[in-house]
Amino acid sequence: MAQLSPVLKQATPVVATHGEGVNLYDADGRRYLDFTAGIGVTSTGHCHPKVVAAAQEQVGKLIHGQYTTVMHQPLLTLVDRLSEVLPQGLDRAFFANSGSEAIEAALRLARQATGRSNVIVFHGGFHGRTVAAASMTSSGTKFRSGFSPLMAGVQVSPFPDPGHFGWSQEETTAFALKQLDYTLQTLSAPNDTAAFFVEPVLGEGGYVPASTEFLAGLRERADKHGILLVLDEVQTGWGRTGKFWGGDHFDAKADILVTAKGLASGFPLSAIAASNALMEKAWPGSQGGTYGANAVACAAAIATLDVIQEEKLVENSAARGAQLKEGLQQVADKHDEIVDVRGLGLMIGNEFRDADGNPDGSTAAKAQQEAAKRGLLLLTCGAWSQVVRFIPALVVSEQEVDEAAGLWAETIDAVL
């Protein structure tokens, strides 16, 4: 009998039969608060009626129209609607299926547009599991080990993570920028460097926000040296951080923006956006793919944007995120093992460390598993898996946040 690969380890024992909003249900009818959102994917919650209706209607019209062969209306409408939310100047889009694919598309565009081979990424960043994307990932060895050689031309520079270095945000940012200059001087000359790739908030790296000064420093160096700045908004986009784009918190200006996850409420769809002047530098035939811009996924993305705007989900993300962070901080204040509660909007991490100050992935795992037993589904992240992350759908209510915070308090009391 065929079975799933044995290396696919489930984070929870739940076998879901259906979902609604932030709730999942198993075959016995037990309800779980899903604060994973499919790793930040189900932005409008499970089976939002408007997303379901849009997908159902589209399935009856056209499921797949390969978009370098024929155009279809959901794609044309989605491109038009993106102008409402994309940062100014980013007026051309290319669609793919996953975040990794979009990252590789951004990489290809950056190299072709600049004629340069190297890229600089930042320690703790996660950009995907495909070969090029994994070569650019440094959030954990599990994403890049065992299939070397990886892609050449990637240099890693420090990300301003105050918790890791033990310094203030200001000191850490100054150090990170100084080391970036050193990287440009010693490892990747500016005229060999096509792009900087950076997440506004580290995802798999531990839910660590960047800073305004750091991203401004990247922009300054990019402009000085003709380097492109690529913002990886795969996890931080579409309202996740309490602003539509994570970079909006830091006044960041990207040359290429990468998005996926919450874009289509669970349907596989990703995209890169750039200016026309930059996008037209891509070589003919370098952009394409069989399933990119699938008609049903595009219809779901349009409905997702409608719901985000009509239900003011970006604002809800900010408000509920502040409420959740306050509730989690109250728990952390009672337990020395939780050394930090951080994040933006509905992207919040709780970092565990042991009595010696070392990252404590073991206790984080126990807390994550105990929470699942109590009906609260969570995930871990961080280099040592020492961070338990809360990423509920943007439709989460005030009552559901209070319930989750209460379950977390019970969880921590049971584990510590």
Image (spheres, helix red, strand yellow):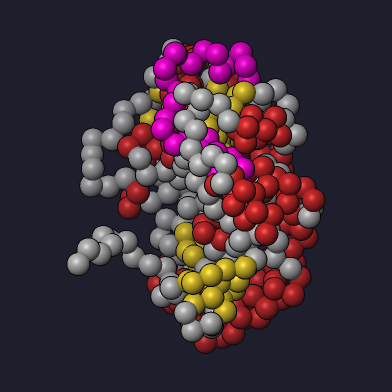
Q: Is residue 287 magenta?
A: yes
Q: Which residue is drawn at 57% across and 79% down?
A: 31
Above or below for 347 versus 144 = below
| The one of 180 and 124 positioned closer to us in this rendering | 124
- Res 289 visible: yes
Q: Nearer the viewer, residue 320 or 33?
A: 33
Nearest the eye: 397 or 391: 397
Q: Is residue 61 left or right of residue 288?
A: right
At x 46%, y 57%, the residue is 382
Is 268 situated above or below 406? above
Residue 301, percent from left and from top = 62, 44
SS majority, magenta: loop
Q: Which quadrant does the N terminus fall into?
A: bottom left
Q: Give x and y (percent) for residue 267.
A: 53, 49
Kindly give the residue lying farthest to the front in the view shown: 60
Please give the range of residues in magenta.
Answer: 275-300
- Residue 371, given in percent of the width and then of the height, sits at 52, 78
Residue at 78% x, 55% y: name it.
Answer: 311
94 left or right, relative to 10: right
Q: Is residue 410 above or below residue 19?
A: below
Q: Where is residue 193 in the image (x, y as percent from the top left)?
A: 45, 20
Numbered marks: total: 0
Residue 310 vs residue 280: left or right? Answer: right
Where is residue 132, by image quadrant? top left
Query: 221 or 344: nearer the eye?
Result: 344
- State the residue lying farthest toward the bottom: 414
- Residue, x 74% and y 68% (percent of image)? 397
Q: Is residue 252 visible?
A: no
Indicate whether residue 32 is drawn in magenta: no
